[in-house]
Image (cartoon, rainbow, N blue to C red):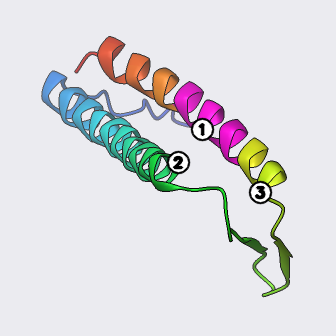
Amino acid sequence: KSETILPKLETSAEKRIKNLENFQALCSKFNFLKHKSDDLNAYLVGRDGLKETLIIENTDGKTFEMSNSRIIEKILLIAQEELYNLLDCSEKEVLKFQI
């Protein structure tokens, strides 16, 4: 004869604590993106477009390097736009979240 085991029901307190943990994770993501966005904006404001080098490195340590300022500017603008989009979505998640 098999017995049916019912899952333990979460209490309101347990659910709220879990929601708080989820909210903190969302806030951490937002703060990380905001910091990166601020760093990129500071770089863009301070750049002169001369003597720049972009280095991309993968986890194996292989690198790709370029010094063409026009290409670097396009890459930075794409990165800025993507960061703004991610930041906007993250902010909306934080604002609509309910604990």
59 in relation to 96, above or below: below
**Disc 2 residue type?**
Leu
The residue under label 1 is 80
Mark nearer the N terminus (1 vs 3) = 3
Q: Quadrant of the C terminus?
A: top left
Compute the Cα span from label 2 to label 1: 9 Å
Residue 44, numbered label: 2
State yes or no: discs 1 and 3 in contact (Cβ < 8 Å). Answer: no
State yes or no: discs 2 and 1 in contact (Cβ < 8 Å). Answer: yes
The residue under label 3 is 69
Q: Looking at the picture, how far across and down is residue 91, in whole percent?
A: 39, 23
Badge 2 element? helix
> In the visual, does 10 lie left or right of 59?
left
Q: Place residue 92 in its image quadrant.
A: top left
Mark nearer the N terminus (2 vs 1) = 2
Q: Residues within 10 Å of mark 2 (few under 14, many from 20)?
A: some
5 in relation to 68, above or below: above
- What residue lies at 78% left-to-right and 87% top-to-bottom? 61
Residue 78 belongs to the span the image colors magenta: yes
Which SS does the magenta portion mostly show? helix
Magenta highlight range: 76-86
Compute the Cα span from label 1 to label 3: 16 Å
Q: Looking at the picture, how far across and down is residue 88, in whole percent?
A: 48, 22
Give the camera-side residue of 26 and 72: 72
Residue 1 visible in rendering:
no
Q: How many marks?
A: 3
* Nearer mark to the viewer, of 2 and 1: 2
Give the camera-side residue of 10 and 92: 92
Q: Looking at the picture, how far across and down is residue 9, in whole percent?
A: 31, 27
Q: Residue furthest top?
A: 96
Badge 1 element? helix
Q: Residues within 10 Å of mark 1 (few under 14, many from 20)?
A: some
